[in-house]
Amino acid sequence: MTQAQQALDYVRGNSERYLSELKDFLTIPSISTLDENKGDVQRAAEWVAAQLRSMKMDNVQIMPTGGHPVVYGEWLGAGKSAPTVMIYGHYDVQPIDPLELWTSDPFGAVVRGDYLHARGSSDMKGQVVASLKAVEAIVRTTGLPVNIKWLVEGEEEIGSEHLGEFIKNNKVLLASDFCLNPDAGMMAADKPTITTGLRGLAYFELKVYGPDKDLHSGLFGGTIHNPAQALIELIAGMHDKNGKVMLPGFYDKVRKLSKKEREDFKRLPVTNKEIIAMTGVPALWGEPQFIPSERTGARPTLEINGLLSGFTGQGSKTVLPAWAMAKISCRLVPDQTPEETMKQMKAYLKKNAPKTIKWELTNLHNAGAAITDSNSAGVKALAQALETVWGKRPYFRREGGSIGSVVLLQKYVGADSLLTGFGLPDDNVHSPNEKLHLPTWYKGIEALTHFFYNF
Ligand code: BES
Ligand code: MN
């Protein structure tokens, strides 16, 4: 029996316990953005640290940052000649609102059919547990053939605000050859995927102020510029009618796609119909000269994430609001930077904001855009592992989401991320009724187990 087979037997023999431990992790509401969940976020960190300790990792620590802590652990017994693989994860999750749209308790972790339902099941506690359990199987059977270091953060869903400083201050501790990052999902249950690029993010809050208090809209309407109206006028001007972003200089640093890259995008098996079915929209939208996978993988965007102003309660109130607010974020591609995007947003507002209102722009958080090496020994080991389990070569694609750690690890540790994952596009991540496809999750654990033996 090969070493990998011994570990895989262990995975199969323990699959029910693996699932029940994942459920346990999912009952902790570790929502990183909400103050009221701070204790839960800490408990989730402790849960991960306890897992690492139970599989005899060394130097396990819950390391403080300016925000939520980082869980670290290592096993360096494979020696200096073996590669060192970092395993990245995040134990924080997105908020659950709107709660009334969930069909079961977001932290109830119930199984219905092939799916486990809970906030964080797909993004990404399921992926964290898949990594933990692959390593556990190897540790309990043959022992690890490579050195590993765990970096599990609690601020990914809020832009990894304190991770840059943490990584910079712990460069020596974190030194590794590659970082396995299973937070990037896959294209479909039968389409194993390696992601070779992620978009960055620049997230803003824009506030527009008018009168010093809410006013009677009959007494003052027509003489005062309604801040809700001024805000949407500003926002409406941020795109042209073809979906191009109108911030000055926004596209200056965007890398042009080569012919070869465009052919690769065209070959990806995603159809417009599938996107329509998955989202429930009547029709797609966006820059007509690019296909949807290019628009999400290689083109930058500007999105309104939320709007707030005036009276929104039951019934009616004739009011002219004192202020209006929008949450706005830009997904960025190489070589745009969040800092330049902030300047471009400010320049747009300076040029276009009318004298009738005051405005205030705050940068909430940022993440860099990344392209990773698709030919490294790490990618080969991962591709081979996915092929062994799925029986077909993985798809390589660039994806539209953001993960702050990828650029930070490139910058401070010189380690490229191996981006993959076992979450599916219809898992409802960040939406009500998040779920995890369990048959794919089990395959993922097996693939990660193979991965470590492939070096
Ligand atoms: N796992 C996602 C990112 C992702 C999703 C990558 C799908 C590739 C494919 C991650 O947890 C996430 O949602 N990140 C945030 C980061 C942001 C707050 C900086 C995002 O992309 O909105
Ligand atoms: Mn995630």
Image (cartoon, rainbow, N blue to C red):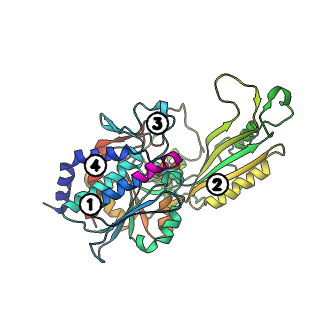
Residue 441 position (above or below residue 373): above
Alpha-carbon neighbours of circle 1 within 10 Å: few (<14), some, or many (≥20)? some
What label does residue 432 carry, if any? 3
Residue 297 shows in this picture: no
Q: Amino acid at mark 4?
A: Lys
Gap in Å between the C-alphas at discs 2 and 4? 40 Å
What label does residue 363 carry, if any? 2
Q: Earlier in the sequence, mark 2 or mark 1?
A: 1
Q: Earlier in the sequence, mark 4 or mark 3?
A: 3
Q: Nearer the viewer, mark 4 or mark 1?
A: 1
What label does residue 443 carry, if any? 4
Q: Earlier in the sequence, mark 2 or mark 3?
A: 2
Q: Nearer the viewer, mark 2 or mark 1?
A: 1
Gap in Å between the C-alphas at discs 4 and 3? 25 Å
Mark 3 lies on a secondary structure that is loop
Q: In the image, is 385 to the left or to the right of 313?
A: left
Alpha-carbon neighbours of circle 3 within 10 Å: few (<14), some, or many (≥20)? many
Residue contact at pointers 1 and 3, CB within 8 angstroms: no
Please give the residue where the numbered disc 1 appears in the rendered image: 55
Q: Does mark 3 have its CB less than 8 Å from ligand 1?
A: no
Q: Amino acid at mark 3?
A: Pro
Mark 1 lies on a secondary structure that is loop
Residue in the image at 74% along x and 40% along y: 323
Residue in the image at 68% along x and 44% along y: 239
Gap in Å between the C-alphas at discs 2 and 1? 41 Å
Residue 131, magenta (yes or no): no
Mark 4 lies on a secondary structure that is helix
Q: In the image, is 355 to the left or to the right of 375?
A: right
Q: Nearer the viewer, mark 1 or mark 3?
A: 1
